[in-house]
Amino acid sequence: MPKWLNDAVFYEIYPQSFYDSNGDGIGDINGITEKLGYVKSLGCNAIWLNPCFDSPFRDAGYDIRDYKLVAPRYGTNADLANLFDKAHSMGIKILLDLVPGHTSDTHKWFTESKKPGKNEFSNRYIWTDSVWEAPPQYRLECGITDRDGNYMVNFFSSQPALNYGFYEITHPKWQLPYTHSECKKTVEALKDIMRFWLDMGCDGFRVDMADSLVKNDDDKIATGKIWQDIRKMMDNEYPECVLISEWSCPQRALKSGFHCDFYLDHRGNGYNALFRYTDDENGELKSFFGGKGNGDITLFTNDYLKRYLESKDYGYMSFFTCNHDTPRMTRYFDELQCKLAYCMIFTMPGVPFLYYGDEIGMKYAENLQSKEGGFHRTGTRTPMQWSSGRNLGFSCAPGEALYLPVDSSADAPTVENRLEDKDSLLNTVKRIIALRHSYEDLHADGDFEILYAEKNCYPLVYKRGKFIIAVNPSCKKASAPVSVIGNDIFLIGGYTLSKTSLTLDEQSFVILSCD
Ligand code: NOJ
């Protein structure tokens, strides 16, 4: 396990929308390089960069046409190499987004694969043996190529699934076992792409849909073996580089070789119960951080503790403030609620991720027309808001030329105006990240224990080494029967200690040092 990951705080950058350095209306790699100082000023020492490769952008770049070429709209491979260098000189690591499960249907592997005659790439994707063969349990695109067969897709129709084979073979005429030499070639092709960027200086990958490789592999046994093999390569050739999975099952992902796995926002899981959970019947927000005091913390603790305890010896779990697929928290929470939520996120074990703009409380833009396969996700992908003036400092292009419109509201938060307010969300985020860095107990592998989490009650109290941390997002004072002797080193709101209890004022958060 590379040591740096233990104290890593990531910043996720959606390249389209971060900073436009050449005035064409879309963000670019050189724009990110120019803003590294800002990333550093937040206390972030690592970046996850969403896909920046050549693509027809039917899914915002998760549909790759050329894995080894930076999309011209973002710059050149040399610009990316320069970003790696500059970032490293400032102590910042850069992870690229690896999309192993599918390509664009315009990738040259696929344009070859769809040809009727046999060629090197005929088996690079999953094809049935005739167009009349279309078992309904598979997502197949039927009858649209000259090749007499249907091909499987992984996500959108424009994203054919790469062929890593099948674990259980139900249709032997066209399904290859995952051990087949043709499937192994797909793995080797993936390793080749990884080496290409790792040799150039990237520090690892966030891996898209990491569990999606081998089909009919419900328990992910074969998919896990592939990742273990790739991890071996990483350990031998790039021991300081890391793999972080989009899987949301750390029990499997970490044992499969990932250093870290995301705790994603899945309906009904613990993350969702903390920050997003809505009641099915009346649409009422019932999340723990929702402020109404009607959340149930045990929906979180029961789910999280199981994952954490089963996986903590193998690697880390990652909390994020949001990502490019989920609505920003500001859709549900005001600034104070976001502060409380983020303070919890940045004091939990595992590796935290901050999504660009969340630190200033950027809004989720409602009702935006879908862009590049974004659909409801588009509202989370609008341009970063830097300062007052033209396009809020994102770009000097005319407004109508922008990739997506900037927030036009009079009170749009910007880095500039949020820095001025010493109690802003931005300054709170900086303070809590700085604190995390300064104490090993708060790092990814520091001990973690729940001290108080009762069904339908507030607050939540947990322990990280010598620190006792408590959060009460509800609008009423709340006590926990926890006896604490200690001094606060970080406080939002107020609290009182007695011999037998810790009481938090409404909407409060505290870190008590108990040595
Ligand atoms: C997950 C990514 O986060 C999402 O943005 C993308 O659309 C799908 N995977 C397909 O690659």
Image (tube, grey):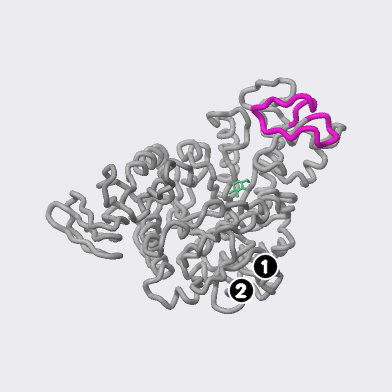
Q: Is residue 424 visible?
A: yes
Q: Which residues are magenta?
A: 127-149
Q: Amino acid at mark 1?
A: Leu
Residue under label 1, please give it: 402
Front-lying residue, 132 or 56: 132
Residue at 67% in and 33% down? 139
Which label's residue is closer to the chain start, 1 or 2?
A: 2
Question: Where does the image place residue 62, in percent across and percent down from the top left?
Answer: 66, 49
Q: Circle 2 — which element?
A: helix
Q: Name the mark on residue 277.
A: none
Q: Is residue 473 above or below residue 169?
A: below
User: Quick check: marks 1 and 2 in contact, CB under 8 Å?
Assistant: yes
Residue at 46% in and 56% down? 321
Question: Where does the image place residue 251, in percent across and percent down from the top left?
Answer: 45, 37
Question: Where does the image place residue 514, in percent across and percent down from the top left?
Answer: 22, 58
Residue 413 located left or right of residue 133: left
Quadrant for residue 201, please give it: bottom right
